[in-house]
Amino acid sequence: MFKVIKKEGKARRGVFTCAHGGEVQTPVFMNVGTQAAIKGGVDAFDLHDLGCQIELSNTYHLHLRPGDKVVRQIFERMKAIPKSEIVNIRYREKMEERKALLKSAKSDYAKAAAELDTLRAEVIKSLRGESAFSQDLLGSLISDCETKCLEVQHTMEAAQAAYDEGQAMLDALNAQYDDIISWADMYDSASTESKKMIVSCLIRRVEVYRDYRLHIDFNIDFEQFSAGLDISAIAA
């Protein structure tokens, strides 16, 4: 998306927002990277220190480097480990803890709410002269119980939010795993254009050092899948 900020004659100043995040002030000098690197002994960190806003590269370069070998190795490692082992088993204990905490919080809230209802019902009895509690005492007890209810409600809401967050993360990991496996299944038989698209989905950026040593930043959250996967060794 491009937004014009200022015009003066034929000149204009604007902001270009990239699809993957980040804003680029225009006009801008855009470097062209071959295999995600700028020629002339300048690496990705030099460009960062110089305040480089944007570098032009393409999926063809990413397809050549890291290349088929690295991409295939990543897919082979992922396919060799069952989905239940990577995702479900690893997070099952954590989700069970959150589920138990939520269940306990809901139980505590139900008890506190029931106690509050009982005290409020006792007020009617007090007005009829049928209660052993004075109205002042009931008022104090109800106030304390309302405070307790509010505290327990906040605890329950926090437990619910934590459980929902964990479930959302689990769903996202399952979806990511399914994406990787579907890409892995089609990669070998895919056309060059399709492979370039798969690589662009798999890789966010490639940082190239002066000695052409690579650091690959993935779109897939491999940190979550790291059990049994030595990604740094694969990409070396």
Image (cartoon, rainbow, N blue to C red):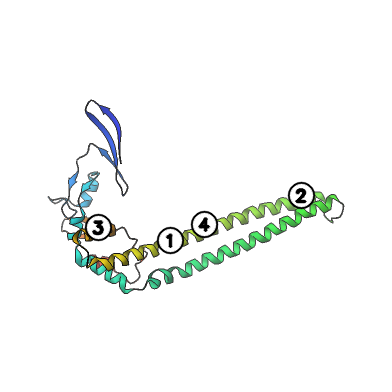
Amino acid type, residue under disc 4 in the picture: Ala
Q: CA distance from mark 4 to mark 1?
A: 12 Å
- Comes first in the chain, label 1 or label 3: 1
Q: CA distance from mark 1 to mark 2?
A: 45 Å
Question: Viewer-nearest of labels 1 and 3?
Answer: 3
- Comes first in the chain, label 4 or label 1: 4
Q: Quick one: label 2, few (<14), some, or many (20+) residues within 10 Å?
A: some
**Where is the C terminus found, in terms of image quarters?**
bottom left
For mark 2, what is the residue? 139
Tag 2, which secondary structure? Answer: helix
Which label number is shown at residue 119? Answer: none
Question: Viewer-nearest of labels 4 and 2?
Answer: 4
- Comes first in the chain, label 3 or label 4: 4
- Comes first in the chain, label 4 or label 2: 2
Tag 3, which secondary structure? Answer: helix
Image location (x, y in percent) of residue 30: 19, 43
Q: Is residue 230 left or right of residue 97?
A: left
Image location (x, y in percent) of residue 85: 39, 73
Tag 1, which secondary structure? Answer: helix
Which label number is shown at residue 197? Answer: 3
Q: CA distance from mark 3 to mark 4?
A: 36 Å
